[in-house]
Amino acid sequence: MDTLWNSNYIKVWSSNFLLNFAFMLVVPLLPIYLSERFSADKDTIGMVLSGYAVAALCVRPFSGYIVDSFPRKAVLLICYFLTTALFAGYLIAGSLTMFAIFRTIHGAPFGATGVSLSTVAVDVLPSSRRTEGIGYYGLSNNIATAISPSVALWLFAAFHSYDLLFSLSLLCSLLGLIVDASLQLKPRPVASAEGANASLPKPHWSLDRFFLLRGWALFLSMFTFAFSYGVVSTFVAIYGKERLGITGGTGLFFALLAIGLIVSRLTGAKSLRKGRVVQNASAGMVVSVFGYAIFAGLQNEWGYYLAPFIIGLGNGHMWPAFQNMFINLAENNQRGTANSTILTSWDLGMGVGMLMGGIVAEHLGYSAAFWTATAINILGVVFYFVIARPHFIRYRLR
């Protein structure tokens, strides 16, 4: 059997873990940081935190095209370097405006790095283990999500220093960059403008080079799930503090979310290996709906800690299945485009969810915001079963 955990795959897995660890060190405390440091209200917090998603959204489609058209290691290193450098912006931002600018700009290279890493991960996997490997690759995100918020909250409780967290994020991202620099990738033909001397013909400038047109239905489905997650993940810390009196429970919330993700990824790996991506996606979405409904309906500690585990179980089945479905709709030279399309749908949903969640929470309260997230999630499930799932079965290439 082909080796799944080859050296390049381990390096890409590790660098993705370090990138997400660095990112999640600051995410849970940012709403509180903006509130305490700059006296930002909920509307403003939603707008500031959605900025990175908007920037990532703008760059993701072009990232897929660039990753498919130029040497992937070079693209990866440039994007990862810019992501690392911009972590320093949080340290020097002295006003809400400056922080919003750095946070927004940060989304662009962060989004491009995510596309590059996931595409390289697919490249270095043996074809016989690709479906399974994509599922395990997601564990790098999940484990980082499980550990990082707890580490952040522990450090903040001990030192009460946001700058310490920003510095640690910068250091972890730098370490990931060093790991990526050691990748040994096989040369692959890339598109060139040199006509007859090119290893591949010059790519045509068409929409399908930036957006996987066959994946439009899956794109809309993923948007709704990302919207719900954007609302809950953005306001979980400040909601727990203001409404439930939970000041140190955000780390446990994200840990339980990640445990659910890890459990479902491990239990779903066998099913993915057998090609049951449609079944995994279907089961994951239905489970997730129950998680969001519990969070919205049980506004107490039971709901606060039970919901993330259930949401994690659902998302852990859903995400790798959806990523495989996007790739199965794409030609081999569109892997970057397929990855950028699914990530674009996630960015768009997260960004709109953060923004709308802030508006609804400010004017109608947290309960209305969380029920809105649940309702959008239900609409996504209905759309998937009625339109997206039949569309995928009809147009899949493999």
Image: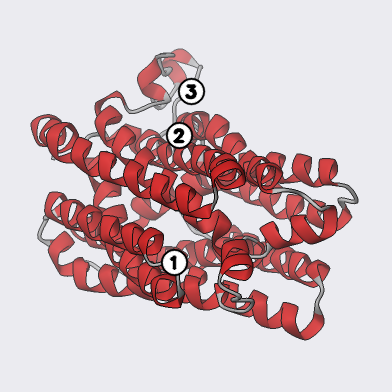
Q: Nearer the viewer, residue 368 or 342?
A: 368
Near mark 2 (Cα within 10 A), the count class, few <14, some 14-19 or many ≥20, is many
Taking the image as shown, residue 228 lies to the left or right of residue 263, namely right
**Circle 3/circle 1 CB separation < 8 Å:** no
Question: Furthest residue to the bottom?
Answer: 158
Q: CA distance from mark 2 to mark 3?
A: 16 Å
Numbered tag placed on residue 64 in the rendering: 2
Q: Residue at x 17, y 51 (%)?
A: 282
Taking the image as shown, residue 68 lies to the left or right of residue 158, namely left
Q: Is residue 169 above or below residue 84?
A: below
Q: Nearer the viewer, mark 2 or mark 3?
A: 2
Image quarter of residue 311? bottom left
Nearer-N-terminus badge (2/3): 2
Q: Which residue is mark 3?
A: 192
Q: Is disc 2 placed on a helix, strand or loop? A: helix
Q: Nearer the viewer, residue 167 or 39?
A: 39
Q: Amino acid at mark 1?
A: Gln
Q: Amino acid at mark 3?
A: Ser
Q: Which residue is mark 1?
A: 299
Question: Furthest residue to the front?
Answer: 364
Q: Residue at x 69, y 63 (%)?
A: 174
Numbered tag placed on residue 33 in the rendering: none
Near mark 1 (Cα within 10 A), the count class, few <14, some 14-19 or many ≥20, is some
**Circle 2/circle 1 CB separation < 8 Å:** no
Q: Amino acid at mark 2?
A: Gly
Near mark 3 (Cα within 10 A), the count class, few <14, some 14-19 or many ≥20, is some
Nearer-N-terminus badge (3/1): 3
Location of residue 175 in the rendering, given as x and y in whole percent from the top left corner: 66, 67
Q: Residue at x 36, y 40 (%)?
A: 224
